[in-house]
């Protein structure tokens, strides 16, 4: 069951006495956040808005929505990281899953006993990583927990940031990810290029994600080579607060133009196939908003992330693209 740190929210409201607040979180948490907005309204007698648009992480907080509503505080729930306050009035609230990993960890012991593994997880299971480490080590598994950096705590990964996983990559035989998220685990597999397993406590099963990650990389590489044939590009800047990478977009524009390509600069809040269909005479796209848009979504035309676009430039210059996903941060 997901447990939201309501105590922290209530303490902040008591201390700051806002006239109104807003709350949001990942889609899977929205029903609980919805209940929490009602609780706040009754407890403090103030409007508590549920921002029900999708929020993918700290790059996508929807602080603009809170400002439009004149909400004095936005509580973003479930994206635990080292930084608990973004901007002046955006506060990150922890949400932890209290399900036990004991049974699935015992299964994992048989798989990785005698090996060295990197133990990693997402925000919801971060508090359980030490107990799983202890159980594995007691049963003959050498466990490494990589150092966090920037927003990441030790052992924690985001969908585009993998510092703890890359920190241990030369010391381990495999990655073991705690949770159900193929999204996070596939990114880890791509960034490290070593076997990666998911420990799913809900279905009490272990899934290897390595082959799925290889298919994502094959698809991404095919998109790069298709884009290399294009003469006209659209370079897309994301309009969400943490995705406004204008300098990166302008860098790619200049590099492509120097290689004889025509480049349109485009700005979008939501980058979808439907929106791109409205644009004419563009053969391929580069988007610098969120790298997972390019790997995890389907598009009619090539749409490259920052690592893919870097590889594209190398191809156009007749250079070796190398392992373009094997970097700590995909932006």
Image: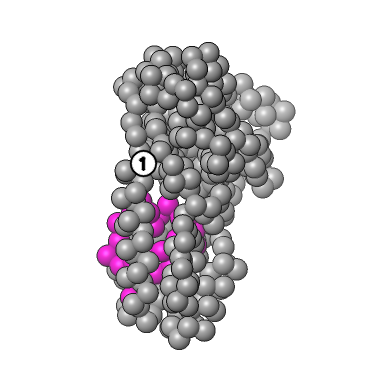
Q: Observer-nearest residue: 211 or 271? A: 211
Q: Which residue is mark 1?
A: 210
Q: Quadrant of the N terminus?
A: top left
Q: Residue at x 53, y 52 (%)?
A: 327
Q: From which residue to which does the magenta span run?
A: 283-305
Q: Residue furthest right?
A: 15
Q: In the rendered image, is residue 213 in sight?
A: yes
Q: Observer-nearest residue: 275 or 308? A: 308
Q: Residue furthest bottom?
A: 260
Q: Residue furthest front?
A: 114
Tell me, yes or no, whether the highlighted magenta stretch contains residue 204. Answer: no
In this view, 264 is above or below 302: below
Q: Residue at x 49, y 14 (%)?
A: 139
Q: Is residue 221 left or right of residue 178?
A: left
Q: Residue at x 48, y 83 (%)?
A: 259
In this view, 274 is above or below 47: below
Q: Quadrant of the C terminus?
A: bottom right
Tell me, yes or no, whether the highlighted magenta stretch contains residue 296. Answer: yes
Q: Residue at x 36, y 41 (%)?
A: 210
**Total marks in image:** 1
In this view, 170 is above or below 281: above
Q: In the rendered image, is residue 41 in sight?
A: no
Color theme of the render:
one colour
Q: Position of residue 150 (x, y in %)?
A: 65, 44
């Amino acid at each position: 069951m997901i447990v939201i740190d309501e105590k922290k929210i209530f303490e902040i409201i008591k201390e700051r006495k806002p006239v109104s607040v807003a709350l949001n979180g990942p889609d899977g948490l929205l029903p609980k956040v919805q209940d929490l907005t009602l609780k706040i309204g009754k407890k403090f007698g103030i409007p508590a808005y549920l921002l029900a648009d999708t929020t993918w992480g700290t790059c996508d907080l929807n602080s603009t929505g809170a400002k439009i509503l004149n909400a004095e505080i936005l509580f973003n729930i479930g994206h635990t990281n080292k930084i608990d306050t973004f901007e002046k009035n955006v506060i990150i609230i922890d949400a932890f899953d209290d399900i036990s990993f004991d049974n699935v960890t015992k299964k994992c012991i048989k798989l990785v006993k005698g090996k060295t593994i990197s133990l990693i997880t997402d925000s919801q299971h971060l508090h359980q990583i030490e107990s799983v480490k202890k159980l594995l080590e007691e049963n003959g598994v050498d466990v490494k927990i990589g150092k966090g950096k920037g927003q990441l705590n030790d052992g924690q990964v985001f969908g585009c940031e993998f510092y703890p996983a890359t920190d241990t990559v030369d010391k381990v035989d495999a990655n073991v990810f705690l949770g159900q998220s193929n999204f996070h685990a596939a990114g880890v597999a791509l960034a490290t290029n070593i076997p990666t397993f998911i420990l799913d406590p809900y279905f009490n099963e272990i899934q290897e994600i390595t082959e799925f990650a290889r298919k994502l990389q094959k698809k991404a590489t095919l998109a790069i080579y298709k884009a290399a044939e294009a003469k006209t590009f659209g370079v897309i800047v994301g309009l969400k607060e943490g995705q406004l990478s204008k300098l990166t977009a302008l860098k790619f524009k200049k590099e492509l133009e120097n290689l004889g390509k025509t480049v349109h600069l485009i700005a979008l809040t939501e980058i979808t196939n439907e929106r791109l269909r409205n644009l004419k005479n563009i053969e391929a796209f580069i988007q610098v908003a969120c790298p997972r848009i390019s790997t995890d979504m389907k598009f009619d035309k090539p749409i490259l992330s920052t690592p893919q676009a870097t590889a594209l430039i190398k191809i156009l210059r007749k250079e070796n693209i190398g392992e373009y996903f094997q970097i700590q941060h995909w932006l």
